[in-house]
C-alpha cells in the first residue's frame, strides 16, 4: 500500500466516497419507475463561496465515481488521475470536482446488485433499462443536494462525453461549458455490433441463468471475461498494441500452443484484463451500460438533425478527438462540431495526434493535457477561481 509520503504531489491524495439516497421516485425513459435510489460519489477540491467553481465529471462504460486520488488499501488511482488534481486540466486548487457512479452501476449506486425494495432480493435481471437522459436527471438531483445551481463545466470522455452533450441539451441553464472528449453523437452500426457480441458472450454463458445468477449462487465469469477482452481490443489502436506487445512470445518459440495455453504476450494481457474485470464488475451492469450506449441518439427526436437537437444549448463547448481512435473516430467529433457551428454555438475543437486509440482520453498525452488545461484556465477565470 502507498504511504502518504509516496503519493505524487499532483494527486488529490487519499479520498473517501460518499453517497446520498433520494426517496423521490425517478421516472425512467423506458417507462419504468424507481421508487428511490442511491448515488455514490466522490468530490475533490473546495467549493467556493458562491458555488460557481463546480465541475461534474461523467464516467464511461466501465468507470465509476472513483475518478481521482487513492483509496486506503488500493495502489491504483482513480480512472482520470491524468486530468484531475493540482495543476492538472481539472485543477483541484481552482475547481470543486464531482463524479458520481451512474444508476445501473455496481459500485455503490442503485443497480442490479442492489436490493429491490419490492422483493427484498437483489434486482438482478429485473433492474430496469436506463439511458443517458436518466443519468442526467439523477446528476441534476445530486447537484441540488450539493447546492450547485450551475456547473462551471460538465466533462467526460467516451460515454461520459455523451452525458455532457445530453446535459447541454436537456438542462441548458445549468452548465456553462460542455467538455466532450472522444465521443460521438450516436453509435455506428459497427459499434452496436461490438456491443452485441459482448452481450451475447455474457448471455450465452451457462452461469448467466437469465440474469439471475446471484440468486443461483453463480456468476457468468467466462462470458464477462470474453466481453471485456473484446471491448479492450477496440479501445486500443493497432499501433499501440504493436508497440506494447508486437509478436512477443512467453514460451519457447516452437511450443505450438499445446492445449491453447497462453503463448503470445498480447494473449496474456487480454486474459489478465478480462479476469481482473470479472473481479470488480457485474455482468448485468455491463449489459445495461452497453445498451445505454446503443440507445444514445439525441438527434432521433428531431428527425436525425443534430443541429436542431442542439439548438437550445447555451453552453460553450470543447470537443476533442484522437487520430488513432477508431471506435469513436475524429469524424464523429467533427459531426458534433458541424452541428454546433450550424446553430452558431461557440465551440473549440482539437484533434490530437496520439497512438493510444480510444483510451487516449485517459492518458497523460502532452498535447491533449495542454489543450484541456488551456481551455479550463479560461473557465476558471470566468468564475474567479
Image (tube, rainbow, N blue to C red):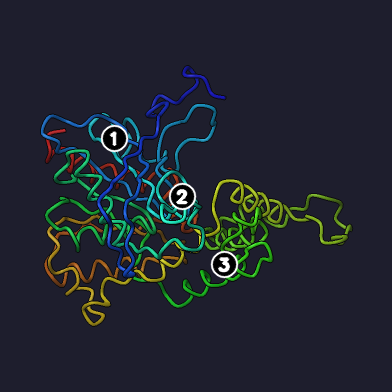
Q: Quadrant of residue 303?
A: bottom left
The Cα–Cα distance between marks 1 and 2, rounded to whole angstroms, is 34 Å
Relative side of 344 to 202, left or right: left
Disc sitting over residue 91 in the figure: 1
The Cα–Cα distance between marks 3 and 2, rounded to whole angstroms, is 23 Å
Residue for point 36% across, 62% down: 183
Residue position marked by numbered label 3 in the rendering: 198
Q: Secondary structure at mark 3?
A: helix
Foreground pick, 71 / 135? 135
Count of marks overlaid on the render: 3
Residue for point 71% across, 56% down: 267
**67 in relation to 256, above or below:** above
- The location of residue 137, given as percent across then percent down, is 25, 56
Foreground pick, 134 / 244? 134
- The location of residue 99, given as percent across then percent down, is 33, 43
Q: Secondary structure at mark 1?
A: loop
Going from N to C along the chain, the mark reached first, 1 or 2, is 1
Foreground pick, 351 / 105? 105
The residue lying furthest to the top in this view is 5
Residue position marked by numbered label 2 in the rendering: 114
Q: Nearer the viewer, mark 3 or mark 2?
A: 2
Is residue 215 visible in this depiction of the protein?
yes
Going from N to C along the chain, the mark reached first, 1 or 3, is 1
Foreground pick, 294 / 259? 294
The Cα–Cα distance between marks 1 and 3, rounded to whole angstroms, is 36 Å
Residue for point 12% across, 59% down: 314
Going from N to C along the chain, the mark reached first, 3 or 2, is 2
Amino acid at each position: 500500500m502507498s504511504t502518504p509520503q509516496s503519493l505524487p504531489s499532483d494527486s488529490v491524495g487519499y479520498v473517501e466516497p460518499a453517497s446520498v439516497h433520494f426517496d423521490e421516485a425517478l421516472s425512467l425513459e423506458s417507462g419504468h419507475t424507481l421508487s428511490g435510489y442511491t448515488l455514490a460519489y466522490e468530490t475533490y477540491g473546495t467549493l467556493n463561496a458562491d458555488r460557481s467553481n463546480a465541475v461534474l465529471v461523467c464516467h464511461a462504460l466501465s468507470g465509476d465515481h472513483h475518478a481521482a486520488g487513492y483509496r486506503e488499501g488500493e495502489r491504483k488511482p482513480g480512472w482520470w488521475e491524468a486530468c484531475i488534481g493540482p495543476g492538472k486540466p481539472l485543477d483541484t486548487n481552482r475547481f470543486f470536482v464531482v463524479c458520481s457512479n451512474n444508476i445501473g452501476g455496481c459500485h455503490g449506486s442503485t443497480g442490479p446488485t442492489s436490493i429491490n425494495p419490492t422483493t427484498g432480493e437483489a434486482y438482478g435481471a429485473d433492474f430496469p433499462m436506463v439511458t443517458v437522459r436518466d443519468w442526467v436527471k439523477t446528476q441534476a438531483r445530486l447537484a441540488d443536494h450539493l447546492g450547485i445551481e450551475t456547473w462551471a463545466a460538465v466533462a467526460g470522455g467516451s460515454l461520459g462525453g455523451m452525458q455532457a452533450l445530453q446535459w447541454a441539451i436537456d438542462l441548458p441553464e445549468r452548465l456553462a461549458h460542455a467538455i466532450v472528449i472522444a465521443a460521438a453523437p450516436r453509435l455506428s452500426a459497427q459499434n452496436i455490433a461490438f456491443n452485441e457480441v459482448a452481450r451475447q458472450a455474457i448471455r450465452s454463458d451457462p452461469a448467466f441463468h437469465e440474469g439471475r445468477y446471484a440468486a443461483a449462487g453463480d456468476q457468468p465469469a467466462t462470458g464477462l471475461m470474453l466481453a471485456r477482452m473484446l471491448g479492450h481490443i477496440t479501445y486500443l489502436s493497432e499501433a499501440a498494441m504493436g508497440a506494447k506487445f508486437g509478436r512477443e512470445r512467453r514460451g519457447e518459440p516452437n511450443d505450438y500452443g499445446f492445449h491453447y495455453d497462453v503463448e503470445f504476450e498480447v494473449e496474456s494481457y487480454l486474459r489478465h484484463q478480462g479476469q481482473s474485470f470479472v473481479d470488480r464488475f457485474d455482468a448485468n451492469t455491463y449489459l445495461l451500460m452497453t445498451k445505454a450506449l446503443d440507445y444514445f441518439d439525441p438527434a432521433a427526436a428531431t428527425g436525425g438533425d443534430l443541429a436542431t437537437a442542439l439548438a437550445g444549448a447555451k453552453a460553450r463547448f470543447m470537443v476533442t478527438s484522437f487520430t488513432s481512435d477508431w471506435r469513436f473516430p475524429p469524424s464523429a467529433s467533427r459531426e458534433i462540431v458541424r452541428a454546433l457551428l450550424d446553430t452558431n454555438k461557440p465551440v473549440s475543437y482539437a484533434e490530437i495526434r496520439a497512438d493510444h486509440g480510444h483510451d487516449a482520453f485517459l492518458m497523460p498525452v502532452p498535447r491533449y493535457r495542454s489543450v484541456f488545461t488551456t481551455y479550463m484556465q479560461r473557465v476558471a477565470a470566468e468564475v474567479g477561481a
